[in-house]
Amino acid sequence: MNIEQVKQIAVIGAGTMGSQIAMACALAGYSVFLQDVQEEGLKKAEASLRNIVSRNVTKGKLTAEQAEQAFSQLHFVSALEAAVMDADFVIEAIIENLEAKRQLFSQLDELAPAHAIFATNSSFMVSSKLADATERQNQVCNMHFFNPVLVMELVEVVQGPHTSEETANVAKALCEKIGKVPIVLKKEIPGFIANRILNKVLSEAAYLLENEIASAEEIDLACTKALNYPIGPFALLDLMGIDVYYHASLHQYEESGNEADKPFKLLVEKYEKGEFGRKTGKGFYEYADQVFMKQK
């Protein structure tokens, strides 16, 4: 299989990541099916995408015709079979739960065409943990996008020991077709590249905050004003979702047994309070009408 044979893409999971991955593919001219079992989730995804695309049209980043064409290419469906029955490439973007992903990949194996490639957008789970749930292990890989997908350029493609060279090449080429910059990891490693580096930054930021050396806002300012980061570590946690990072850290700790990989104390406290960041209106900062405010 080569990239020219990829005509239809299915994205499974209509959350923030999945919906924007689907739109990125639709904007590139692909026929895309965005699937989620929750109808309400699909409605929210469409409303969010229309809002984002409308702003991009207003800013001159897209024409109204390009926006209209993209939405005509994007189909919102709740039935898994309808989404993948004619798919050439399937991107999974559901919750970071191993058993849920394995169950999905097993279903995909039964429903999708034999030639279809399966990619997981997991931010930390290597695809070898999912591949053996299918009869096409050589057609399974990681394809890790970054949030927000319609802004961030990088995609980490991970070629596991089971992944064929052909599959990795098609995944890389698809990234390029949709305007992304891919890097290919030739060996699996939990957390991949960007998040492994980010974890070190977050660990040190947590140490500084928990020991009351500086506030979250001051630590973020040090990173943005001295290190030229586009966003500070605590603002980033609020953006990506404190719940998402909590589960990722917990999984990494369970895998490694390394105490340093455990979710840090303040992260656990935020998670247990249900303060997940922007999505709940409060995390390390408070958010009122999407206005960035210092936490009280």
Image: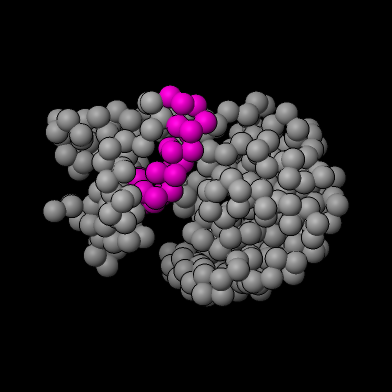
Check residue 72 for magenta coloring.
Answer: no
Q: Nearer the viewer, residue 271 or 89?
A: 271
Using the rendered image of the protein, determine whether residue 7 is visible from the camera's viewpoint. Answer: no
Q: Residue at x 65, y 59 (%)?
A: 11
Check residue 246 for magenta coloring.
Answer: yes
Q: Which residues are magenta?
A: 236-258
Q: Position of residue 219 (x, y in %)?
A: 22, 36
The vertical placement of 31 against 216, above or below, is below
The vertical placement of 64 against 161, above or below, is below
Q: Nearer the viewer, residue 201 or 176?
A: 201
Q: Residue at x 43, y 37 (%)?
A: 249
Q: Quadrant of residue 107?
A: bottom right
Q: Residue at x 21, y 41 (%)?
A: 216
Q: Position of residue 284 (x, y in %)?
A: 25, 48
What secondary structure is the stretch in magenta mostly built from? helix
The vertical placement of 10 against 172, above or below, is below
Q: Position of residue 239 (x, y in %)?
A: 37, 51
Q: Quadrant of residue 7?
A: bottom right
290 relative to 262 in the view: left or right: left
The vertical placement of 21 against 169, above or below, is below
